[in-house]
């Protein structure tokens, strides 16, 4: 008796779009922190391209969190989120603001 070949399902359009969204290289953006809540470790960035993005420092090294404040120039990636896009993977650009 011959072995049966397992049937692999064809990917759906949703599968393809999800793959493309998660595997696209994201360019680093830059901007300035314009509002920051030091207690909650979240704030707002005015990106150099005109976008306004929210951010949270939960994923940032705890030793670096006290270096973020209003006026700090940062580099980040943009992540689509609800209710608004978010800045992730923040790093400080200039050391004068720290």
Image (cartoon, rainbow, N blue to C red):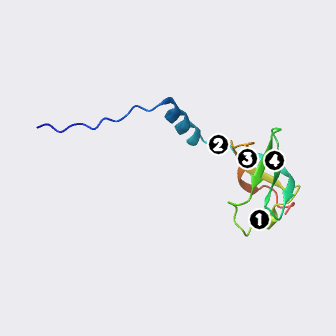
Counting residues from the start of the chain, the first of labels 2 and 1 encountered is: 2
- Residue 3 x, y percent position in the rendering: 17, 39
**Percent x, y for residue 88?**
70, 51
State how far apart marks 4 and 2 are (Cα): 16 Å
Secondary structure, mark 4, is strand
Q: Position of residue 48 (x, y in %)?
A: 82, 42
Would you say the residues marked 4 and 1 are in contact, meaning their CB atoms lie under 8 Å apart? Answer: no
Q: 34 above or below 17?
A: below
Residue lying farthest to the bottom in this orientation: 63
**SS at mark 3 in the image:** strand
Picture residue at 55% right of the left edge, 38% below the top: 18
Q: Earlier in the sequence, mark 4 or mark 3?
A: 4
* Distance from Cα at disc 1 to Cα at disc 3: 17 Å
* Secondary structure at numbered mark 1: helix
Identify residue for label 4.
31
The quadrant in which the C terminus is found is bottom right
Dot 4 or dot 2: first in sequence order is 2
Kindly identify which residue carries mark 3. Answer: 86
Residue beneath label 1, please? 65
- Near mark 4 (Cα within 10 A), the count class, few <14, some 14-19 or many ≥20, is many
Q: Secondary structure under badge 2?
A: loop
Of badges 2 and 1, nearer the viewer stands 1
Identify the image quadrant of residue 78: top right
Q: Which mark is residue 17?
A: none
**Image quadrant where one finds the N terminus:** top left
User: Crowding at label 1, few (<14), some or many (≥20) Cα neighbours within 10 Å?
Assistant: some
| Furthest residue in direction front, as rendered | 83
């Amino acid at each position: 008796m011959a072995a049966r070949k397992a049937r692999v399902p064809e990917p759906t359009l949703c599968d393809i779009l999800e793959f493309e969204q998660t595997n696209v290289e994201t360019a680093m953006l830059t901007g300035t922190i314009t509002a920051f809540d030091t207690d909650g470790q979240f704030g707002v960035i005015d990106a150099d391209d005109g976008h306004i993005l929210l951010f949270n420092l939960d994923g940032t090294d705890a030793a670096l969190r006290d270096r973020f404040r209003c006026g700090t120039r940062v580099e980040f990636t943009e992540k689509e989120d609800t209710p608004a896009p978010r800045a992730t993977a923040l790093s400080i650009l200039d050391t004068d603001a720290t």
